[in-house]
Image (spheres, helix red, strand yellow):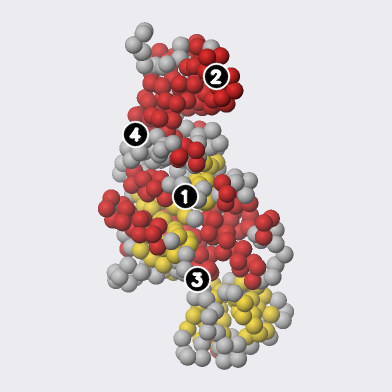
Amino acid sequence: MSNKIKLVSSEYRTVNYVTGPLVFLKGIKGVSYGEMVEITLPDGKVRNGQVLEISEEMACVQIFEGTQGIDADKTTVKFKGEVAKIGVSVDMMGRVLNGFGKPIDGGPEIIPDEMLEIAGSPINPYSRAEPRDFIQTGISAIDGLNTLVRGQKLPIFSGSGLPANELIAQIIQQAKVKSGEEFAIVFGAMGITNREASFFQKNFEQTGALQKVVFFLNLADDPTIERIVTPRCALTVAEYLAFKQDMQVLVILTDMTNYCEALREISTAREEVPGRRGYPGYMYTDLSTIYERAGRIKGKKGSITQLVILTMPDDDITHPIPDLTGYITEGQIVLSRSLFRRGVFPPIDVLPCLSRLMNMGIGDGKTREDHRGIANQLYASYAQGRDLRRLVAIVGEEALSELDRKHLKFADDFEKFFISQGNEDRTIEQTLDMGWELVSAYPDGELKQVKKEHIAKYRVKTKTE
C-alpha cells in the first residue's frame, strides 16, 4: 500500500521557475538528493533529470536534455525513487556512446549485464592495494622520468592549442601492460568540438585501438548537465571492467576544464556564493569524487589508472582547476608552449613534471635496476643546462667553462633526441639506453646521481675514450 501512495504522490505540477539547466519546484515532500526525475512536457515529450538540492519548501532539479520548452504551468514532474544508473557490459568495448552511455555510432543496442549507480564512491582506504607495476606508454619523457604506475591518477596540464589530444591518442595506441593480461581503455570526452571528436574517432579506427576503447562522447553543443554525468558514467564502466571482469583499465578524461566550467554554470544558476574566479567553493570536493575512483583493490586482479587532461586558462598553472587537481592527484605532466614552438613533440617540460608513485613502479624486476639513478642524472643535468641558457643570454657562451658548455649542449640534445620523438614507440630499455647515451658525454666524476656499478655496466663509450 505504501508503495502505491508513494507512486501517486511523486507526480507534481508545481514548477515554480526555470533558470539555465535547472527547474525549481515548490511543495515537494518525500524526495531524496540524487533521485532521478522524469519531466513530461505539454507536447508529451519526456526529459530526464536529477534532484540537485532539497529543502523544506523547494526542490532543485537539473535537466539533462536542457530546459527549453518547459512550461511552468503545464509540465508534469515525476520523482522515480531511484538514483542515476547506467547499464554496463563488456560489449561496450569498441562502441561510441553519448555522455549517458547510450550508443550513438549506429550500432545495435547494448544488452546490459548489470545496472550500476553512476555516483560510485572512492575506494575504501583499508581495501586499497598499493599502486605498483609499470605501464609502458612508449613516451620517453613519461616512461623514463615520470613513470605511470598501475592504479595511479596522473593529469596532463596542457594549454590552448598544445597537442594534448595527439599525445593522448599516441598513448592509447602504444600503452602496454604485462603479457596475458586483458587491457581496456575508457575514454570520456567532455565538451570537445566536432573536429576533436572526428580526430579521435578516425585515429582509433585507423590504428585499431577502437576495439579496446569504450568511447563516451559529449560535444561542446550537448547539454551542460551531460558534461557533469559523463565522467561518472565512464568511471562506473571502468569499475565494472576492472573489478568484475579483472581487466587493467586506463581511464582518460578530457577536458576537465570543460567539466569545471559546467560546474560553474550550474553553480551560478543556483545563485550560490562563488569561490575563486567564480568557481563553486565545493569544486575541490567534487573533483575528488572523480579522481579518487582510481586505484587497485586488495584481492582483485583488475585496476583503474587515470590520465586526466585539463587546459590551463592562459597557461596559468596556479589557476583553480590545475591547482586543485594537483592537490588530489599523484603528480602532473606539463606541456610547454616554448618547446611546441620549436617543433618538439611531445612538448613535455620535464622540470615541473612529477610522478609521486614512480618509485613504486620502477626498479629491478619492473623496469631496470638503473632506472631511478639515470632519471635523477637526466633531471640534474638538464636543470643545469636550462639555468645556463639564461646566463648565456647575459654574458655570452665564451664566458662559460668547458663543463658548462657540456651542460648547455646536453640540454639541447636532451630536448632534441630524448623528449622529441614524434610518433616513435619506444620500449623502456630504449628510453634508458638513450639516457645513458646522453649522459656519457660527461666524465665519470660528473655522474653523481648514478651508482658506480651502473656506470661501469651501462655507460656508453665515446669516440675519445
**Whether residue 198 can be seen here:** yes
x and y, in percent, of residue 4 in the image: 55, 89
Q: 10 or 405, which lies in front?
A: 405
Is the residue marked by circle 3 packed among few (<14), some (14-19), or many (20+) residues within 10 Å? some
Callout 1: SS:
loop
4 vs 3, front mark: 3
Q: Residue at x 64, y 83 (%)?
A: 17
Q: Residue at x 33, y 58 (%)?
A: 201
N-terminal label among 2 and 3: 3
Q: CA distance from mark 4 to mark 3?
A: 42 Å
2 vs 1, front mark: 2
Q: The residue under label 3 is which amino acid type? A: Pro
2 vs 4, front mark: 2
Asked whether, in this view, residue 307 is left or right of residue 11, the answer is left
- Residue beneath label 3, please? 223
3 vs 1, front mark: 1
Is the residue marked by circle 4 packed among few (<14), some (14-19), or many (20+) residues within 10 Å? some
**Whether residue 155 can be seen here:** no
- Residue beneath label 2, please? 396
Callout 2: SS:
loop
Q: Residue at x 62, y 80 (%)?
A: 18
- Residue beneath label 1, please? 161
N-terminal label among 4 and 3: 3
x and y, in percent, of residue 345 in the image: 40, 39
Callout 4: SS:
loop
Q: The residue under label 2 is which amino acid type? A: Gly
- Residue beneath label 4, please? 427
